[in-house]
Image: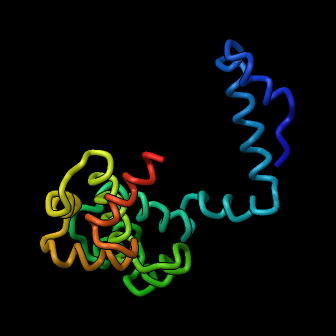
Amino acid sequence: MNISMTHLDLLENKQDIPILALGIQKEILYRILMGEQGHRLRHIVSIGSTSYRISQSIEWLKKNFNHSFSIHALAEQVNMSASSFHQHFKTMTSTTPLQFQKQLRLQEARRLMFEERLDAATASFQVGYESPSQFNREYARLFGLPPLQDISKLHDLSNI
């Protein structure tokens, strides 16, 4: 996507941002919707479409990742059968709903340990894990290192 010089000039003329920002946002959205992948985005946001219903479930999972859920209940929320929901969810996200939740939990736990300096056990409980050992195994599987080593490495890298 080409960004005009006028848009880049806003970075230097910050007083223009409140007045011109809405128009620029509309232009960007228009160009995205009319671009080569626009049909995919329009399909996702079409109310009632399967993609839209799956996106509603994704939003629910993002807000409630620390709570247990059943596939049947989640599918029912979006008026789909469990098998159809599971299939469409995996098509759209390349992962299952449970794996998606696990990734959200682990990413949030990583953030809590790195930014808020929580220990692994506390972070694991806050994101919904009941077993610290299970959390440690799944964390190492996703990030390649156990929590303590990973966070130490991240802190070292951030101090460079």
Identify the residue at horizontal 32%, vertical 51% (top origin). Answer: 114
Instruction: Pick whichever, 76 or 155, lies toward us.
Output: 155
Classify 144 as above or below 33.
below
Decide if residue 15 is on the left or right side of residue 99. Answer: right
Identify the residue at horizontal 34%, vertical 65% (top origin). Answer: 150
Find the residue positioned furthest to the top. Answer: 15
Find the residue positioned furthest to the bottom. Answer: 83
Q: What is the basis of the colouring in this image?
A: rainbow
Count of numbered badges drawn on the protein: 0
Residue 16 in picture, x, y percent from top left:
72, 15
Classify 77 as above or below 64.
below
Identify the residue at horizontal 80%, vertical 47% (top origin). Answer: 31
**Residue 144 location, quadrant:** bottom left
Residue 6 in picture, x, y percent from top left:
84, 26
Instruction: Pick whichever, 77 or 93, lies toward us.
Output: 93
Identify the residue at horizontal 72%, vertical 44% (top origin). Answer: 29
**Residue 47 location, quadrant:** bottom right
**Residue 19 location, quadrant:** top right
Decide if residue 101 is on the left or right side of residue 53. Answer: left
Decide if residue 18 is on the left or right side of residue 159. Answer: right
Residue 133 in picture, x, y percent from top left:
16, 77
Classify 43 as above or below 20.
below
